[in-house]
Amino acid sequence: MPDFDTDPTQLLESAPWALAAMIGTLRDATAAPLQNVLATNPERTAVLEAAGLVRRGAGGFTVHPVLEPADPATGRSVVAARLSGLRQALDAAESEQIPGAEQRWAQQSDEVLLNQGRASAATGRAIAGRVVPALPGLPERLARAGARILDVGTGVAALAVVLATEFPAAEVVGVDVLQRALDLAKAELEQAGPEAAARIAVRLQDVGDISEQNAYDLVWLPIPFLSGPALTAALPRLHTALRPGGWLVAGTHQAFSDPLRQAVAAWTGYLNGGNSASDTDRAAEALRTAGFGDDRRFPTVPGGPILLAARKSPDPE
């Protein structure tokens, strides 16, 4: 039971400022060495120290891994994702909730859609750099002419651009239920360069309506953004749409043990038009029920999403 003899309001009011200090530091560190960033903004760094993200020592600062993205591009994606989360929280505080999954996501501003979409570029790089090389047969498939990738919930097509760039033999098809996001994707594709953009096609389509058979070598599925009924309808269709031996990679989140993060995950899943049961264990069970096997897990940043890969059985030789 909560302890009503104490007031948690002060801690809750401090948390957004601590997150703002983290985001600002990450942003500045994409253009300057992190140690310099920490040293030149001591008041902000003191907030990070109080939050347990930085320790000051005689030789400089020791920092938590979340403040050290692998590269500047990943850092920019992390900043975009964190900013998107803050803006969604502000929107939730200011606006009435609208029933209906598609309506809830459609209510997000263009800025949130762009930031959330651009943040997915980091997921695309993780898929290309860490996941695909570890999945038997998939690098060879994606290197062959005629390779095809399906990007479910493509949004502004940032993840599709990364995959098209990293796998130059592959065609990437992005589907989304929100026309406004696809309109924003057109501008993003113009900046991707003609070679990659020529191999990306985006279309307005619900994943539950996909009827292709043996058409794709790789499918990306962001499970937290699908409602429960949508996920149930989608998985058998995606299994059919994959070529034998092809792989589905799903975005999931770790199961949280504390009640606050459990409740926040459920609420944000609802606001994003998704579901509250998108943790990795439940997602793996749903994939196995739909006929997928050989599931493998790939953690991302500390506390971040877990990429879950599962395979459609190859044709018997």
Image: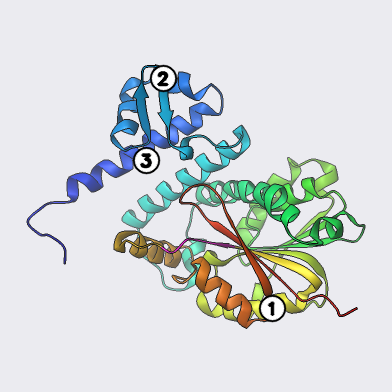
Q: Residue at x 42, y 61 (%)?
A: 268
Q: Nearest the camera: 27 or 57?
A: 57
Give the label, 2 or 3, closer to the camera: 2
Numbered label attached to residue 19: 3
Q: Amino acid at mark 3?
A: Leu
The secondary structure that dominates the magenta segment is loop
Residue 253, how many percent across, how many down?
Answer: 49, 61
Q: Quadrant of residue 315?
A: bottom right
Measured Cα–Cα span from mark 1 to mark 3: 39 Å
Give the label, 1 or 3, closer to the camera: 3
Residue with the mark numbered 2 = 60
Q: How many marks?
A: 3
Q: Quadrant of the N terminus?
A: bottom left
Looking at the image, tell me whether mark 1 or mark 3 is earlier in sequence order. 3
What's the magenta region?
251-255
Secondary structure at numbered mark 1: helix
Measured Cα–Cα span from mark 1 to mark 2: 55 Å
Looking at the image, tell me whether mark 2 or mark 3 is earlier in sequence order. 3
Q: Is residue 181 left or right of residue 15?
A: right
Residue with the mark numbered 1 = 209
Measured Cα–Cα span from mark 2 to mark 3: 22 Å
Magenta stretch holds residue 119? no
Secondary structure at numbered mark 3: helix
- Tag 1–tag 3 contact (CB < 8 Å): no
Secondary structure at numbered mark 2: strand
Looking at the image, tell me whether mark 1 or mark 2 is earlier in sequence order. 2
Q: Is residue 157 at least partly visible in the picture?
A: no
Q: Is residue 204 at least partly visible in the picture?
A: yes
Magenta stretch holds residue 253? yes
Q: Amino acid at mark 1?
A: Asp
Q: Is residue 106 left or right of residue 40?
A: right
Q: Nearest the camera: 40 or 129?
A: 129
